[in-house]
Image (cartoon, rainbow, N blue to C red):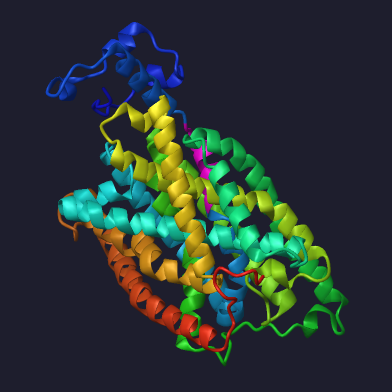
Amino acid sequence: MDTIAPQTASKNATNKGSTLDPDQIARIDHSYDQAIGTVTDFEKQKTAEGEAHFRRLGWKRLAVILIVEAIGLGTFSLPGAFATLGIVAGVFCCIALGFMAIYTAWIIGKIKVLYPSIKHYGDIGGLLMGRFGEELFGAMYVLQLILITASFVLTGSIALNILADDKVCGLIFSAVSGFMLFILAIMPSFAEAAILGYIDLVCIMTAIGIAVIASGVNASNQPGGIGASDWSAWPDPDATFKDGMVAICNIIFAYCFAMYMTPFMDEMHTPEDFMKSVWTLGGVEIFIYTLSGSLIYVFVGKDVASPALQSLPGILPKVAFGVALPMIFISGAIGNTVTAKYVHLRFYKNSIVRFVNTPKGWVTWLLTLAGITIISWVLGEAIPFFNDLLSLSSALFVSGFILYFPAVMWYKLICRGKWYARENILHAVACIFTFIFGLLVLVGGTYATALDIQHHYEIGAFRTPFSCEA
């Protein structure tokens, strides 16, 4: 039979991988199953192996996965945000929102340590509001992850079209992107995904370097040199409230790593080390986002494209997108894995099928992954734009996952004693500010993005959905 109670593997099992002796297998509690049937030795074996297999992630690999998942799409939308906000406000937002993301990631990670049974964001919703909260948070979580995968489908299609000089039907390239996101997401363990993450990390750093250096060289070769660029330290005087909110939402999207904390930490053998990963990622993100966003904007000027790689001269967009292709597909595939694991776990929460180490486990896993990928591909084709897709998902979902939800979590799940006690007051004030800012992004960002989408469709700025247009 398939049903078996979820348990935490012992440290010995974790350290030895899947090599388990009969005593370890015998220690697996099956009291839940005694109420409905007998647990076989095979089920005990597969459960023990599964628990050990999914407890191999250390803080260094976690840092790599978080960097890979966070730095990519967001980086290439930031120069456009700087063009709207100006250098001063752009740098301030990158740094301030970066530290805010680190803080809310600490809250979510702390909750995972205090409540080790939670496996994803939906479980935190259950802690806050019972079954309703679990379903609400879970639905929002899946929708956001699918939108992110759709963004990678779109970006992959853009990259392939540029490499092919727009000579191939764009619909074919978007299908190729979706297929790659499926293939690279087949392995369900994040410890294995971290291996691909090292390749991704090299590619994204190289692509960012190419974008910054090439745009700088091109600017210096223009009449008047870099000094002739039309960048500004202050916000664009023609920018509206809508433009400002879209720019801020793009920066927020770049810092959405906190929403991945629970599923990634669930595979850690020492979850208490999570802040080492968070500080590593946060420092790297703030440095890269601030430097690349400001420099590319200064070099290119107010007409910088989004993604920024399209602003490079001559053949350089091809070079940069070619280097970035592994990043696009690997980062997108890791997010695809997170989505599929959530859905698969919901269906097989109390079954050995959830470990994906039996024939039924693999079949159901592949079907789940294929379904999620197809939905993402459809969205990527139905919403063929870049900035507004990022802004819409940020305003609707990321505003909650990394801002106002964690603020509520601290009050309800972490705070001990009175909120105004000396040891709590700084956290209390920080969470109040984070909550209010999150609601502002939710309302203002959604409204601004809706207006932006309407305007772009009215002027015909988007290609027709499900067409061969590049």
What x and y, as percent, mark residue 1? 26, 22
Name the residue at 51% across, 46% down.
334
Q: In this view, does 95 lie above or below 47?
A: below
Q: Quadrant of residue 231?
A: bottom right
Residue 419 seen in this snapshot: yes
| Closer to us: 254 or 51 | 51
Q: In this view, does 150 lie to the left or right of 292?
A: left
What x and y, as percent, mark residue 202? 68, 46
Q: In this view, does 411 lie above or below 52?
A: below
- Outermost residue toward the left? 35
Name the residue at 85% across, 84% down.
224
Name the residue at 57% across, 55% down.
71
Residue 286 seen in this snapshot: no
Q: Is residue 208 above or below residue 449?
A: above
- Look at the image and say whether residue 66 sits in the magenta stretch: yes
Magenta span: predominant SS is helix
Quadrant occupied by the C terminus:
bottom right
What x and y, as percent, mark residue 442? 35, 72
Name the residue at 80% across, 71% down.
313
- Look at the image and say whether residue 139 sits in the magenta stretch: no
What x and y, as percent, mark residue 179? 58, 49
| Closer to us: 161 or 115 | 161
Q: In this view, does 467 lie to the left or right of 120?
A: right
Question: For the magenta stretch, what is the residue range?
Answer: 57-69
| Closer to us: 121 or 289 | 121
Q: In this view, does 395 lie to the left or right of 152?
A: left
- Outermost residue toward the top? 22
How many dots with numbers?
A: 0
